[in-house]
Amino acid sequence: MPDLLDWIRQSRGGRELLDAPNRPLGYLRSLLDESLTGDAEPPHPARRYDAHRDQVAAACRRDVVDQAAAVATARDAARAEWHSREQARQAERAGPGTGRHAALAAARAAARGDHAAARAIAATDVQDWPAVAQPGAGLPRL
C-alpha cells in the first residue's frame, strides 16, 4: 500500500493529498484516474498485462520456431534436389556414352577457340551410338 500512495503522490506532481475530501469515492476515483492515465509508470504491472505480455512472447517464439522449421524444410528439400542432380550427373559420367562425352569435349574445345583439338576429338571414331534406322527397313523387332 505504501508503494501505491507514493506512486499517486508522484503522479500528482508535488500537490498534497486532501485529508478529508467531501466525496471520498469521487476523490479516490479522480486520483486513480489521474495517476493511471498519467506519465508515471505504475509500481506493479497488472497481472493481466503480465499474462498478455507472456502470451505475446510465446506467440513470437512459436512464430520463430515455425519459420525456422519452414526454412529447414526448404533447405533440406533443396539439398535433396542437389544431391539427386549430383548423383544423376555422376551416373551419366560413369556409364556408357563415350561418344557423347567426346562430342561434349569437342564442343568445349571449340568454345575455347582450340579448333584443331576439336577437329581431332571429332575425328576419333567412337561407335557407341545406336544404329540409325534406314528408310524402308520396317519397324524394329523387339
Image: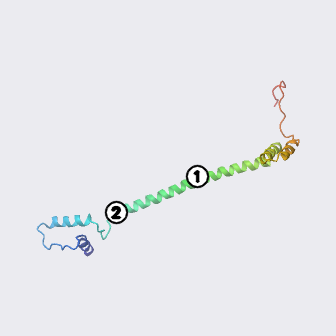
Q: In which quarter of the image is residue 125?
A: top right
Q: Which residue of the protein is positioned furthest toward the bottom in this rendering?
A: 2
Q: Residue 74's mark?
A: 1
Please provide percent x and percent y for residue 51.
36, 62
Question: Which secondary structure, mark 1?
Answer: helix
Of residue 40 and residue 3, the one placed in the foreground of this image is 40
Residue for point 69% across, 49% down = 84
Please provide percent x and percent y for residue 33.
22, 64
Q: Residue 49's mark?
A: 2
Q: How many marks?
A: 2
Please provide percent x and percent y for residue 6.
25, 74
Residue for point 44% across, 60% down = 58
Residue for point 33% across, 65% down = 47
Q: Which amino acid does label 1 sit on?
A: Ala
Q: In this view, does 104 lie above or below 25?
A: above
Q: In this view, does 24 lie to the left or right of 13?
A: left
Q: In which quarter of the image is residue 122?
A: top right
Q: In which quarter of the image is residue 132?
A: top right
Name the N-terminal-most of marks 1 and 2.
2
Q: Which amino acid does label 2 sit on?
A: Tyr
Please provide percent x and percent y for residue 28.
18, 67
Q: Which residue of the protein is positioned furthest toward the left in this rendering?
A: 22
Say how the picture is coloured. Answer: rainbow
